[in-house]
Amino acid sequence: MIRKWLVVVVLLLVAGVLIAIFWAGGSKNDLTSTTIGSSVSEGIEGITDLPVGGSAPTGLEGELPAPERPWIALIIDDFGPVCSAVVVPGFLELSFDLTISVIPGNPKTVSIGRAVEAAGRELFIHLPMEPNQPVAMDERDMVLVGMDSLALHTILERVQGELPSAVGMNNHMGSRATSDEALMRLLATELKRRGMTFVDSRTVAHSRGYPAMKVVGVPVLRRDVFIDNVRESERIREQLARLVHLARRRGWALGIGHADPVTLEVLTEELPSLVASGVRIVSAGRLTRTVWDMRRKEITDTGIAASSMNDGK
């Protein structure tokens, strides 16, 4: 009888131990589950700036050019010759993001480039290119039709050595050179390697500069308006108005002016009122890269939309 009671007592003790272990384990698992769930929930709530679907940021967040908030960019080029040095201080004193484009191989090239950099302005290389008419062919760094990749590379190494802070390029003359597809592909390859942008000055209607840059993947825009082909105040104002009208219609526009006292005078008078009217003046490099990214995003979004429709069939 005593043995039976001992067996019962032992069994009860074992059962008690098992029950204690079970409840202890259950409590621990519940605590762990609650902690993990809380951490995940807090983590998700803390992420407030991720796009829907987990896509990486495009780099285009924030204000972009649009008809209701137009951007214009102005390249002022033909700096480099001695005669251009007199207007450098005036252009650099303007409190607007103008892009200064300097012709390499001229007496004032290096000093103007340094002044532009010191002023915190954007610098372009105004690269001489072969025109249709054999005039002004005495530029040291003329890009010629038929030039091979080594010759072009040598020129770009030299001009970038003179203007190391340059972030982009536009052509000086070049009606013949920019019409040559092969030459423009070579130039595009060099610019992509150097991380530079290109603005086609459009000195000829059938220029191949723009399409060549697009194919190679160089951020590129075309000049919309020459603001001072006629160096008279009223004509410059008219051209500037054309540029702004285009920007208000399309969202942005790019103009080119020259290192000239009349151009400086008109811009000094007109740019403050343009800004006051809601026009934003940005550097040519910024506008080029922004529009380039916007177009690439449009292409990507269109492709995604088309793919989604195809998947739904």
Image (cartoon, rainbow, N blue to C red):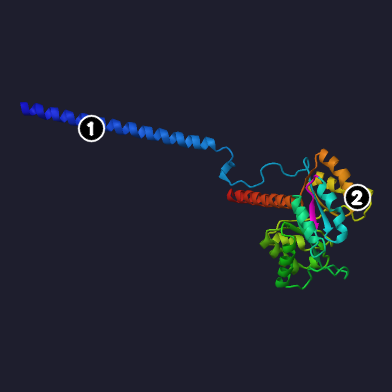
Callout 2: SS: helix
Question: Image quadrant for the N terminus?
Answer: top left
- Name which quarter of the figure residue 131 lies in: bottom right
Q: Position of residue 123 (x, y in %)?
A: 76, 55
Q: CA distance from mark 2 to mark 1?
A: 95 Å
The amino acid at mark 2 is: Ile
Seen in the picture, residue 207 relative to 302 is either above or below; the reply is below
Residue 99 painted magenta: yes
Which residue is pictured at 58% across the width and 50% down the height? Answer: 311
Magenta residue span: 95-101
| Displayed quadrant of residue 13 | top left
Depicted 221 relative to depicted 1: above or below: below
Which residue shows up at 10% across the image and 28% down it? 6
Residue 275 image offset from top left, x and y in percent:
81, 41
Residue 82 magenta-drawn? Answer: no
Is residue 159 toward the left or the right of residue 272 in the image?
Answer: left
Q: Which residue is mark 1?
A: 18
Q: Which mark is residue 174?
A: none
Mark before the other along the chain sequence, 2 or 1: 1
Characterize the local packing of mark 1: few (<14), some (14-19) or many (20 or more) Cα atoms within 10 angstroms: few
